[in-house]
Image (tube, rainbow, N blue to C red):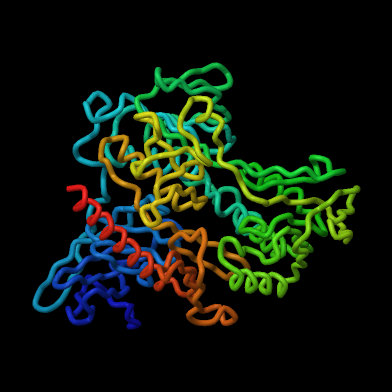
Amino acid sequence: MESQAAPDFTSGVPIDRVRDGGMIQGKVGDEDAILVRRGREFFAVGANCTHYHAQLVEGLVVGEELRCPLHHACFSLRTGEALRAPAFDSIPCWRVELVSGKVFVREKLSAPIPKSTAVSASADKGPSSVVIVGAGGAGLAAAEMLRRQGYDGPVTMITAEDDPPYDRPNLSKEFLAGQAPDDWMPLRLKDYFAEQRIDLVLKSRVTSLDVGRKRLQVEDGTSYEFGALLLATGADPVKLTVPGASDSQLYYLRSFADARVLATKTASAKQVVVVGASFIGLEVAASLRERNIAVHVVAPEHVPLERALGAEIGQFMRGLHEAHGVVFHLGETVARLDGRKATLSGGTTLDADLLVLGVGVRPSLALAELAGLKVDRGIVVNEYLETSAPGIFAAGDVARWPDPCSGQLVRIEHWVVAERQGQVAARNMLGQRERFESVPFFWTQQYGVSIKSVGHAEKWDAVEIDGSLEAQDCAVSYKLGGRTLSVATISRNLQSLQVEAEMEASLRASSARRAEEVA
């Protein structure tokens, strides 16, 4: 990025104003735009990501892609198309002309449209119909990609939830903190599903799946036949039994309905006990403190987030929470609840208007198990996200797939991973045979401090910190046998994108080597 006065791109910009591989921000009429250079070729695109409206000029150019610094959405420089989640909508794109050593931005180009060659349900390469079980990130991403790829057959999404697809990561962040109203939460506007001919079936739980007949049934007896099926059933919160507690005192946060109930119940709360010191527990704690509610965190681990991000970041996050008034009771559990008095395993008693339980989730496997699909701590899929039954795919929190880095089956509970899997599964339903080789990415934000992580490390033998946690400016690398598996960053958005791109390049090189060995 170059910090100069924003130019008017329609009046022309000297070619040497933009370095090769660089970009500058300016205006096209009243619209903010970015001019990007790759060699002698220039591209003009919109300045803001269509996901959370981050400034793309602070992002990274990788080949012909522009990547967002906030949540790693990816856009085509040629067409503006949103190539990878979490963004679904394209950014504006303008025609560029080089005249007498200057770059001029001309008329706006038409937005990307579905593929010119529609994939018909009656064609050999298109399924007769597609049914998606689940309406979370993976389910919506799949439905949206089917239509974007030109599939014109029936698409049905079935969910047990009351709400259309919504921004689940926001539930424990801005929404619970009271900073995001209800109408900010839907991922798509109400009319989208009708316009795209996506039959969204709410409040309907699928009870049986007949793999051989390609048919499933919901609780009310309605059955649906499918040519291709995506299981995006997600995960369910781990439930705890607290002696003496009534259901009206124990709350979980997984769905939009859960979040609305919790927001209402905590409106008059003075003090809340959060059980669990993982991401969900700490995000809930931070959001409640934003509303000046006293919070005590009780958890059996001795360092918050240690399993996911190590002791170093865990201790930093504990200090951050304590600086905002959170009290930790680590190495303990809630032994019982008597009215408003919670007794901990170590004998401490705490006043609690209610308990929020965030101790993890389990993949929703019942449907797959009953149908006889291969299950092993998740629905097992191959590199194309296809289950043991041809034509049936799985994506999101419920899927366990072969990680090309480790060679092991993994299941990762990240929102962006789920969305990107939904997109790949959709393309594979249409016969594209695309391997899922995306580098995992997730983020958490607490008290305005954002941690972004790329890669995946279930275990490591070394942690290297470049920079300072205390200064909230660092990159933390997790290594095993000298190899970097993942990198978490604070205040280093560009570096996070660069690490992701390097990991992707390594994956492509590994895939090419495997292909040569097979050949």
Left/right placement of residue 369 relative to residue 130 reads right
Say if 107 sits above or below 124 in the image: below
The residue that appears at 44% across and 51% down in the rendered structure is 417
Residue 275 percent location from the top left of the image: 73, 54
Say if 109 sits above or below 397 in the image: below
Q: Could you tell me which quadrant the N terminus lies in?
A: bottom left
Q: Quadrant of residue 113?
A: top left
Report if residue 459 is visible in the image: yes
In this view, the residue in front, 212 or 90, is 212
Disc tally is 0
Say if 72 sits above or below 193 in the image: below
The residue that appears at 67% across and 57% down in the rendered structure is 281
Residue 145 percent location from the top left of the image: 34, 42
Residue 395 percent location from the top left of the image: 44, 41
The residue that appears at 49% across and 48% down in the rendered structure is 411
Residue 137 percent location from the top left of the image: 47, 45
The residue that appears at 57% across and 78% down in the rendered structure is 469
Report if residue 31 is visible in the image: no
In this view, the residue in front, 18 or 141, is 141
In this view, the residue in front, 184 or 236, is 236
Q: Quadrant of residue 206?
A: top right
Q: Quadrant of residue 161?
A: top right
In this view, the residue in front, 215 or 173, is 215
